[in-house]
Image (cartoon, rainbow, N blue to C red):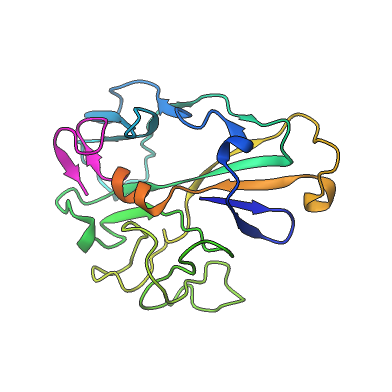
Amino acid sequence: MIGVDSGAGKQYSTIQASDFYSPLANIAALRRTGGPWDANSIKVDSLGNIDGFWAGGKEYDQTFSTVVTVDFDVNPVTINPASCARSVTFELAIADICDSSLPDSAIATDEQVLYWSPIPNFPGVPGAPFGAPTASPNHSVPGNDPNFVPAGPAYSKYDGYVDAAHTVAGDGWGSPATLKVTRVTALPAGCTGNGGLGDDIYIYPSAQQINDELPVWSGPKVGEGTLYWK
């Protein structure tokens, strides 16, 4: 799912990702095993491309504010010199599982599983606008609140909700972690986006990709090994 911002906000685009950047996969990977977690693994898609990782298996006291990290490397990403892209931002789906006794996200609240959820709510996206059955009291003023959550269908199973019934959008709704790559070469002649400075490109995972690959399996592929969390 691709959004292009040429100066008037993101607009849905059907241009291929390869027109904007390379490589298309194997961008991030775990640096090492061990560390603060008892178990971890990469995630790969059906073609064997690395497109994520997980770490866990150990409980930490949530009353402490100590930062617990997972080391990973980011391989070089090159913006296509023939494109008018000045930046490429990857919108990442992350689940921070705080309550290991609740393995099923279908009844999870923000206190049990906190999400950083990419939700492509911009013009042209098929099915948009995505939302929640009940507007969040914290994000309820359209036009005034940039985090406004409209009423509408969910984007993925992991949008993030305050309540176990999944009717009120939570703080992680539409708030993905991001990885931004900035162009270091000159733009081709004739690029007009953002006053001639170039276009900003946003790459979102599809809802199906999130639904398939955010669950935690012991093996690297979906459905491989033991299912730890879904």
The vertical placement of 157 against 178, above or below, is: below
Asked if residue 224 lies in the magenta stretch, the reply is: yes
Give the percent coordinates (x, y) of residue 215. 26, 45
Give the percent coordinates (x, y) of residue 14. 58, 50
Give the percent coordinates (x, y) of residue 123. 59, 65
The vertical placement of 79 against 153, above or below, is: above
Image label count: 0
85 or 174: nearer the viewer: 85
Left or right: residue 10 versus residue 90 is: right
62 or 72: nearer the viewer: 72
Left or right: residue 1 versus residue 43 is: right
Residue stretch in magenta:
214-230
Quarter of the image where one finds residue 135: bottom left
Give the percent coordinates (x, y) of residue 109. 27, 63
User: At x 63% / y 58%, what residue is drawn?
Assistant: 10
User: At x 74% / y 57%, what residue is drawn?
Assistant: 7
Q: What is the chief secondary structure element of the magenta stretch?
A: loop
Q: Residue furthest top?
A: 32
The vertical placement of 75 against 58, above or below, is: above
197 or 63: nearer the viewer: 197
48 or 144: nearer the viewer: 48
Quarter of the image where one finds residue 213: top left
User: At x 76% / y 29%, what residue is drawn?
Assistant: 185
User: At x 30% / y 22%, what residue is drawn?
Assistant: 33
Left or right: residue 69 versus residue 181 is: left
Asked if residue 211 lies in the magenta stretch, the reply is: no
